[in-house]
């Protein structure tokens, strides 16, 4: 069924005929007046600077209207016949912005490019993930067809794994106007100085604006239940209770169902809202029980339909307490009056540390809703062992008065030995009032970076030298990057992926890349090219052919770690029982248990094939294949989604499984060559698509909607020719 899109958006009616700065401002102000918005002074300043052609760094508080400033940049691009990009760290935000901009600017003026595909990619306004823009900058340099870029959540510049993608456009797109936005940027002068040096444009920094909804910070030394009961009495809800693991959030939601959260009428409203809702997965019964009690849970391990339900009920004022993870800081649509921190430390993948000022303020900044609240609240719980000690002291005082000898006998509980870093009221004050830390460069060199730069028109080697020596790194770090780049270059020339030319070619290159970079780097998964080649070596006449194709594709997907670990745990449990029955000695049992892996169909063939293949594709050696069996395991066990989740005991992480199965389905649709798509492959694809859709259609619905839009764009272009 064709997907309808509005031909024109609300904002296009205000496009000026002569797009000079004054008429652009007049048109945009007419638009904001039409929709009933009055610009803050900081918004006006930023928009004036954008229309004046300057770079703009916006570091105003959450809720101060940075999105509207970004919209002004896109408005200008459409008016001037230019091209602007909107970038964000996650596909969900990109997709959300795409549909929102379609509403404002009209579908014909907005496109989207992500790893899942492209819709109207030649539009004046393009929404994409940051890596897409970074690769475009590497491939085209200053000549890239990009007039302005709105970088949302720019604090990801300091992300350990992905920060390079935020830095590269600043280095390479020297003719492009940059609008950098985040509430927690920290010191920005070095960005302003660097942008001006590279581009010659003036740079305006818009900061210091008052937060539209002021925040009040409170350190609590009562139990969490007591604190939440007080919040309910004071009507400072909805409250978001921050946890740092999905399990902790779910367990807290269960504990809070004992509180008297909803009135009788509100319970009736909740019942009416969910009367037709399908709570049909294993975690669904828990969600149903929580929301009936006025309690929500919100984290990435849930099915999308449950997260959307929680957001909808919270928006209607029917969920007063929402237990979730710290992902609240990026792209979560939950209305919040109060943010409650259960702790101020988290495990960062290496160690448990106290939150940074930036992490804390990203989460705290979600408190207080513009247009609904006059004030937002941020409460922090003291460590549980400190609360326990304070309560014990209070009881001792009630019994013995202020007798020092008696009070000294009160035992001070020990802090947790694992997963804990100490914090106190001073820590809370420092995080609440402090300035976000300096954003540190995370520049990195990879095969794909080198190939993209070398393949651009002109002297790619000179461009790569500039990139390696004139970035935001220290000289010592750049020496390391240069050594790595040289090693990568040698591996590319040895495998003839990169060819040195005796004479410049038609694009003035003396170095040429002998692969189609567009095809290599724009597929759904980085290892999709390997899957396309490996499937050619499977025999369609073999009975296991369709499942073997699925195993090849699964080996290219990210691991659903929680599922695989449960597979391994159950395999160990079964093996242990078997060995005990056979009387195997303890030491041998332990050795054999250590060797147990999760299921890895075609393991040896996949590794051997990839090792041979990667000699001709060295840029993908760091993205090693990951043999596994989740989709295949589900098929071979002939289980429903519900049965499979219960079998492995992963109901709290069923969203992880469903997203993985959705990716496997997309890979079956996208990455099986037509001449290898047998009837059995078609049936397997249909089965997996139906299973995902029946469990929660939202993951596939949007993807198929975008696929349909892409096909319509292609048909329109053919018709135009």
Image (cartoon, helix red, strand yellow):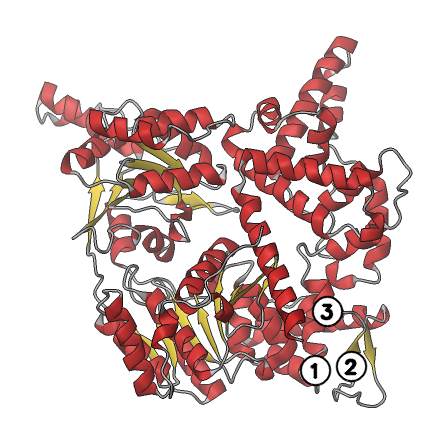
Mark 2 falls on what kind of element? strand
Identify the residue at image location x=26%, y=39%.
317
Q: Which residue is mark 1?
A: 460
Q: Residues within 10 Å of mark 1 (few under 14, many from 20)?
A: many
Mark 3 falls on what kind of element? helix
Q: Which residue is mark 2?
A: 511
Looking at this rendering, what residue extends furthest in the left direction? 401
Question: Residue 56 location in percent, x, y?
Answer: 37, 77
Q: Earlier in the sequence, mark 1 or mark 2?
A: 1
Identify the residue at image location x=25%, y=72%.
42
Q: In screen coordinates, is 100 left or right of 28? A: right
Q: Are marks 1 and 2 in contact (CB under 8 Å)?
A: yes
Q: Earlier in the sequence, mark 2 or mark 3?
A: 2
Between marks 2 and 3 in the image, the one whose residue lies nearer the viewer: 3
Distance of label 2 from label 3 (alpha carbons): 14 Å
What is the quadrant of residue 12 in the picture? Answer: bottom left
Between marks 3 and 1 in the image, the one whose residue lies nearer the viewer: 3
Q: Which residue is mark 3?
A: 517
Q: In screen coordinates, is 74 left or right of 341? A: right
**Does residue 208 appear anywhere in the picture?**
no
Question: How many labels, in total?
Answer: 3
Distance of label 1 from label 2 (alpha carbons): 7 Å
**Does residue 65 appear anywhere in the picture?**
yes
């Amino acid at each position: 069924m064709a997907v309808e899109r509005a031909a024109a958006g609300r904002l296009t009616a205000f496009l000026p005929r002569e797009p000079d700065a004054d008429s652009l401002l007049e048109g945009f102000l007419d638009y904001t007046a039409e929709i009933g918005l009055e610009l803050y002074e900081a918004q006006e300043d930023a928009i004036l600077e954008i229309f004046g052609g300057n770079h703009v760094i916006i570091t105003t508080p959450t809720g101060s209207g940075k999105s509207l400033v970004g919209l002004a940049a896109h408005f200008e691009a459409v008016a001037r016949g230019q091209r602007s990009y909107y970038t964000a760290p996650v596909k969900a935000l990109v997709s959300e912005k795409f549909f929102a901009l379609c509403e404002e600017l009209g579908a014909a003026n907005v496109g989207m490019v992500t790893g899942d595909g492209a819709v109207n990619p030649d539009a004046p306004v393009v929404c994409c993930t940051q890596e897409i823009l970074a690769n475009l900058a590497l491939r085209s340099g200053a000549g890239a067809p990009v007039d302005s870029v709105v970088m949302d959540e720019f604090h990801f510049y300091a992300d350990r794994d992905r920060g390079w993608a935020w830095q590269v456009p600043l280095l390479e797109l020297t003719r492009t106007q940059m609008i950098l936005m985040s509430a927690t940027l920290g010191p920005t002068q070095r960005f302003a100085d660097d942008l001006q040096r590279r581009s010659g444009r003036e740079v305006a920094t818009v900061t210091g604006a008052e937060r539209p909804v002021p925040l009040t910070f409170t350190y609590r030394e009562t139990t969490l239940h007591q604190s939440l009961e007080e919040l309910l009495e004071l009507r400072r809800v909805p409250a978001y209770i921050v946890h740092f693991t999905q399990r902790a959030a779910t367990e807290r939601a269960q504990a809070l169902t004992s509180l008297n959260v909803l009135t009788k009428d509100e319970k009736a409203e909740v019942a009416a809202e969910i009367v037709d809702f399908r709570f049909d997965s294993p975690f669904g019964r828990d969600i149903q029980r929580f929301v009936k009690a006025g309690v929500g849970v919100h984290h990435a391990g849930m099915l999308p339909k449950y997260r959307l339900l929680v957001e909808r009920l919270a928006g209607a004022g029917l969920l007063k307490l929402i237990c979730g993870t710290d992902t609240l800081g990026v792209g979560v649509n939950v209305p919040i009056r109060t943010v409650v921190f259960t702790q101020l430390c988290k495990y960062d993948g290496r160690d448990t540390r106290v939150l940074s000022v930036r992490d804390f303020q990203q989460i705290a900044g979600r408190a207080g809703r513009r247009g609904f609240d006059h004030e937002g609240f941020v409460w922090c719980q003291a460590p549980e062992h400190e609360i326990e000690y304070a309560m014990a002291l209070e009881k001792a005082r009630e019994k013995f008065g202020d007798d020092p000898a008696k009070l000294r006998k009160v035992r001070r509980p020990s802090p947790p030995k694992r997963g804990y870093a100490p914090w106190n009221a001073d820590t809370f004050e420092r995080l609440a009032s402090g300035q976000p830390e300096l954003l540190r460069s995370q520049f990195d060199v990879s095969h794909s970076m080198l190939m993209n730069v070398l393949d651009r028109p002109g002297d790619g080697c000179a461009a790569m030298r500039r990139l390696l020596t004139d970035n935001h790194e220290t000289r010592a770090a750049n020496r390391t990057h240069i050594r790595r780049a040289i090693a990568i270059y040698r591996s590319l020339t040895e495998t003839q992926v990169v060819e040195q030319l005796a004479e410049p070619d038609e694009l003035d290159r003396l170095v040429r890349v002998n692969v189609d970079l567009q095809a290599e780097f724009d597929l759904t998964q980085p290892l999709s090219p390997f899957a396309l080649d490996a499937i050619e070596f499977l025999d369609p006449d073999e009975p296991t052919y369709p499942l073997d194709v699925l195993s090849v594709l699964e080996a290219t997907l990210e691991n659903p770690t929680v599922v695989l670990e449960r597979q391994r745990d159950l395999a160990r449990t079964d093996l242990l029982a078997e060995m005990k029955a056979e009387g195997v000695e303890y030491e041998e049992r332990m050795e054999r248990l250590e060797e147990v892996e999760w299921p890895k169909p075609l393991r040896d063939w996949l590794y051997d094939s990839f090792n041979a293949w990667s000699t001709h594709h060295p840029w993908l050696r760091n993205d090693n294949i990951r043999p596994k069996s989740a989709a295949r395991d589900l098929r071979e066990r002939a289980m429903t989604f519900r049965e499979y989740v219960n079998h492995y005991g992963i109901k709290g992480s069923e969203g992880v499984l469903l997203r993985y199965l959705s990716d496997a389905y997309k890979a079956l649709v996208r990455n099986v060559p037509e001449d290898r798509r047998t009837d059995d492959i078609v049936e397997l694809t249909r089965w997996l698509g139906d299973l995902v859709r029946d469990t929660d259609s939202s993951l596939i619905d949007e993807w198929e909607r975008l696929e349909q839009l892409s096909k319509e764009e292609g048909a329109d272009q053919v018709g135009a020719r």
